[in-house]
Amino acid sequence: MDEKTQAVLTRIAEALERMAPPAPPEPDFRAARLFRHAPASDAFLPAPDYTLPLDLLIGVDGQKARFVENLRRFACRLPANHALLWGVRGTGKSSLAKAAFMAVADAHPALKLVEVDRDEVAALPPLFDRLRGRTERFVVLCDDLSFEDGAAAAKALKSALEGGVAGPPENVLFVATSNRRHLMPRDHQEGRGMIAAAEDAEEEVSVSDRFGLWIGFPPMDQPAYIEAVKTYATRFGLSTPDLQGRALRWAQLRGSRSGRIAWQFIRDLAGEMGVNLPG
């Protein structure tokens, strides 16, 4: 090869290197315990610790025990299941996932939580591959998951959970919260033929089957709601005449009862009394 040709090839190689996307930054998982994943840059952005204590989640003791035990097994490198926390809004699904993680992570420093956006489900397979083989153990959390985009997103998640020929990463546990047990959008049949809609539905339901642990969060009845309010008030030293009546009127104005509504009432009451609360 003559010098002129060699020079041309060198310039082409250098131009291609300049055009190539930069390598993703090497994550520093020592910087925090909680992270958000940014798919565009493949960066892991550290987040502050979740401050709501696990024992402040009232009325979900059974759900709490099952989830914490599954998480503890994963942290201890024992068999554990991907978890789907499903139920009506405001019942503490997301709060339980994060508070339980913090409680278990206190005893297991290698445990990290990576939160992903529900609109970035397609980025899960490469994310799982990125985390595979690291010494840390990762809880990947997707809050309010549903397949609004149909079967394509469901296939991406199924691919991530199955792991292809390499199998699923041993050091990754996927946790999703959803208002729907089978993750399907309510209008998934609109604009679709019956056969195509049925195939999409089958694909989406099959993803739900990949979660070995399903934990349901039913609506909160009035006695449980009042008990939550009283427990919070006692915990933070909040005393007011007609606490129960005020709490019920608050729920009536919101049109529902839940752990979230109880906590919002307590925050309003604490603000009125000049008392600071966690979270």
Image: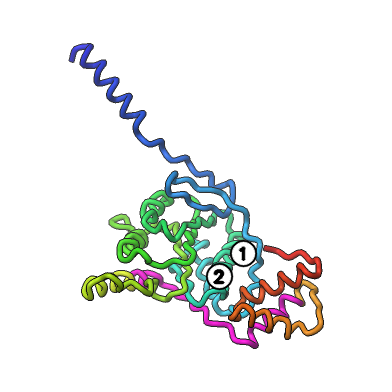
Q: Quadrant of residue 222?
A: bottom right
Residue 241 to residue 21: above or below: below
Q: Residue furthest left?
A: 1
Which quadrant does the C terminus fall into?
bottom right
Q: Tell me, what colour scheme is on the image?
A: rainbow
Q: Secondary structure at mark 1?
A: helix
Range of magenta residues = 207-233
Q: Quadrant of residue 186?
A: bottom left
Which disc is residue 68 wearing? 2
Q: Residue furthest top?
A: 3
Amino acid carrying mark 2 in the image? Val
Q: CA distance from mark 2 to mark 1?
A: 8 Å
Image coordinates of residue 75 in percent, x first then y, are 52, 61
Amino acid carrying mark 1 in the image? Ala
- Please say whether residue 222 is one of the residues in the magenta stretch: yes
- Please say whether residue 211 is one of the residues in the magenta stretch: yes
Question: For this rendering, which residue is in front, 185 or 39?
Answer: 185
In the image, taking residue 95 as reference, residue 231 lies left or right, namely right
Residue 29 to residue 148: above or below: above
Tell me which residue sits at (73%, 65%) in the image: 277
In the image, taking residue 209 as reference, residue 137 lies left or right, namely right
In the image, taking residue 123 as reference, residue 6 lies left or right, namely left
Residue for badge 1: 103
Tell me which residue sits at (44%, 58%) in the image: 172
Which quadrant does the N terminus fall into?
top left
Image coordinates of residue 198 in percent, x first then y, are 25, 75
